[in-house]
Amino acid sequence: MEVRYFSRTRKPELESGTLEYAELKTMLSWAEIISIHVPKHTNALDADAFSLIEPGTVLINTSLGPTFEIGDFLRWIEQGGNFAILDGDGVGRFRNECLKYPNIIVSESVGGWTRQARERLTRKVLDNIKSYLSERGSVLDESI
């Protein structure tokens, strides 16, 4: 499994044989799973960015506050084959609209998790992603 990241500031200290830097446009057109981690109220994706994302991609947004225009996002979802997991705080007043779509999961924000709870949740998320990729016929690196 290849893992790429984009940041406005490249972080060579994070790069290794399993993690490499990619320009945003390259990463968006390549990735099967996109996870967004940006400061509150950062417009991370616009209509042009969504147009680069291949059908069948999973978008995970754990950022607080809106990180994209909801109209651009919903047009992308409505194209079919796309899936999103969104933080409840990240969708704000559009929560109910997002809940109308079967391919959008809106999670609750939970503070004060224990380390053990975060580890269990991380393992579960990774297991779900592996299962999804396996169903699509993608090659998995079982060391993850």
Image (tube, rainbow, N blue to C red):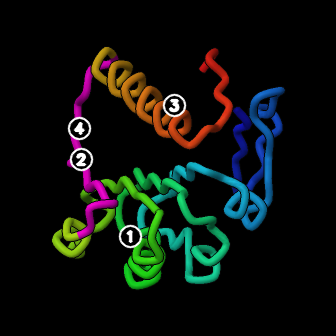
Q: How far across and down, in percent of the image, does residue 28 sit? A: 67, 62
Q: Residue furthest left?
A: 96
Question: Marks 3 and 4, Cα distance to the nearest angstrom?
Answer: 26 Å
Point out the stretch of residues depicted in magenta: 101-115
Q: Residue at x 48, y 58 (%)?
A: 39
Which image quarter is the C terminus in?
Answer: top right
- Within-10-Å neighbours for mark 1: few <14, some 14–19, many 20+: many
CA gap, disc 3 and disc 1:
28 Å
> What residue is drawn where x is 56% and y is 43%?
136
Q: Is residue 72 above or below residue 128?
A: below
Instruction: Read off the residue under disc 4.
Output: 111
Residue, disc 2: 109
Considering the whole magenta stretch, tell me its main secondary structure. loop
- Residue at x-position 26% and y-position 56%: 106
Residue tagged 3:
130
Callouts 2 and 1 close, C-beta under 8 Å: no
| Three-letter residue code for mark 4 | Gly
Question: How far, Cα to Cα, is label 2 from label 3?
Answer: 24 Å
Query: Mark 2: which amino acid?
Result: Ser
Q: Mark 3 falls on what kind of element? A: helix
Density class for disc 3 (Cα within 10 Å; few <14, some 14-19, many ≥20) is some
User: How far is the residue under mark 4 from the one under mark 2?
Assistant: 7 Å
Q: Which mark is residue 66?
A: 1
Residue 16 - label = none
